[in-house]
Image: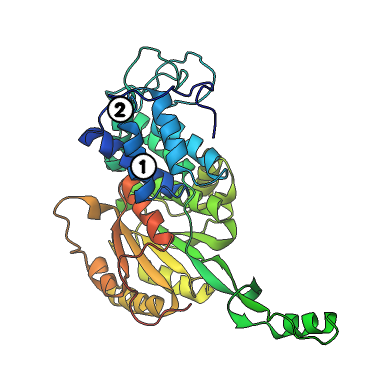
Amino acid sequence: MPPADGPGFPGAPGEAGAAADGGLVAVMTGFARTLRAAGVPADHERTQNLLRALSCLDAARPGDVYWAGRLTLCASADDLPRYDRVFRAYFGGLRAGPARTQAAVTVTRHTAAPTGGDPGGREDGPPLAAGASAAEVLRHRDVAKMTAAELAEAHRLLALLAPARERRASRRFRPSRRGRLDARRTIREILRRGGEAAVLRHRTHRTRPRRVVLLVDVSGSMTPYADTLLRLAHALVGSEPRATEVFSAGTRLTRLTAELRHRDPGTAMDAVSRAVPDWSGGTRLGEELRRLLALGDARGATVVIASDGWERGDVSLLGAEMARLSRTAHRVVWVNPHKGQEGYQPLTAGMRAALPYVDDFVAGHSLAAFEELAGLLAGAYAGPSRGRRFP
């Protein structure tokens, strides 16, 4: 913990700090959700501690907000780099460094983010809540309705995501204080002690991240969302390269995992655009699912299908392959961008055929929806899976 009189750290809080009104609560809750999606354990209790701290500080000062969040939301030193990256992105370029002047960075169409001076300084400028509120509005905006500048900002926030993964038991074991008896280690310990009785040794299964298979529909009806969904796929591959497979689906199935392993999102998207031969074509999800199941990648994995369900092929084939997929995969998640629209009903023939075999049906139109999806991949399930599931 840095000293209270260190650079950029405010002094003792005043008796009448800024009140955490409804707007501030919404902004900071959104900030905590973004941190959780990036892998920082900013749970409900830590978020409440942050709000209590800000009620004693000046929430309009970047330094107060930065240090209050860092001291309440981070659990270890490993969280600090992620916290700094998310703070800079969420609050529009603010950083906890030496005082310097930067031009204002526009976050949304009509609102400019605060300047990038010293968060602990007392410089005059737009209040921190203004830039944070703009970022909160951006989180819930439909990506199909964003301006070019807003879409670029949304893509920058997506690049910061480091989604956690649900853990599953591995076949390998590790020493443990509890669990099943480790006969070999126990016998070796007895022999080492000359035949005297020794403490019993135990072992338990190691854990590894559960594989995620993402199928992105790149047909014409998905054009407003396909690029953003593939950038989300880039973040998933970056967080767990060995436990993620990405395919595009249109008139054919194309594996995109290798292209998405480039660290730079722009380079990865250029490689994807060259690799996908059927941009803005039709959709034959039934046939693509049959090819995916033949590859064997879906077995025991969490399968995420990002599509609006406009099936151009045989709908009965789609239903049959979805039934096979539900028996093979650990969990099936369907991401439909139109589900985030008010009054949406899954009336297309493709959606009606697929929904009986889907475990989670979620929206995929905004940053907030992508954060919800990241929570599902981390194991935050809303309900039990359907039917038999592999461990």
Q: Are marks 1 and 2 in contact (CB under 8 Å)?
A: no
**In the picture, which quadrant includes the N terminus?**
top right
Q: Nearer the viewer, residue 44 or 345?
A: 44
Q: Residues within 10 Å of mark 2 (few under 14, many from 20)?
A: many
What is the three-letter code of the residue carrying label 2?
Answer: Ala
What's the distance in space between the residues labelled 1 and 2, CA to CA?
A: 18 Å
Q: Position of residue 391 (x, y in %)?
A: 48, 77
In terms of image quadrants, where is residue 133?
A: top left
**Residue pushed farthest front?**
196
Residue matched to label 2: 129
Left or right: 23 with respect to 96? left
Number of numbered tags placed on the structure image: 2
In terms of image quadrants, where is residue 78?
A: top right
Q: Nearer the viewer, residue 120 or 126?
A: 120
Does residue 370 show up?
no
The disc placed on residue 49 is: 1
Task: Please name the colour scheme applied to the rendered image.
Answer: rainbow
Q: Residue at x 30, y 27 (%)?
A: 129
Does residue 363 show up?
yes
What is the three-letter code of the residue carrying label 1?
Answer: Asn
388, above or below 226, in the image:
below
Q: Residues within 10 Å of mark 1 (few under 14, many from 20)?
A: some
* Marks 1 and 2, the one that precedes in the sequence: 1
Q: Position of residue 68 (x, y in %)?
A: 41, 33
Q: Position of residue 275 (x, y in %)?
A: 53, 52
Left or right: 361 with respect to 235? left
Q: Residue at x 40, y 27 (%)?
A: 64
Left or right: 347 with respect to 18? left
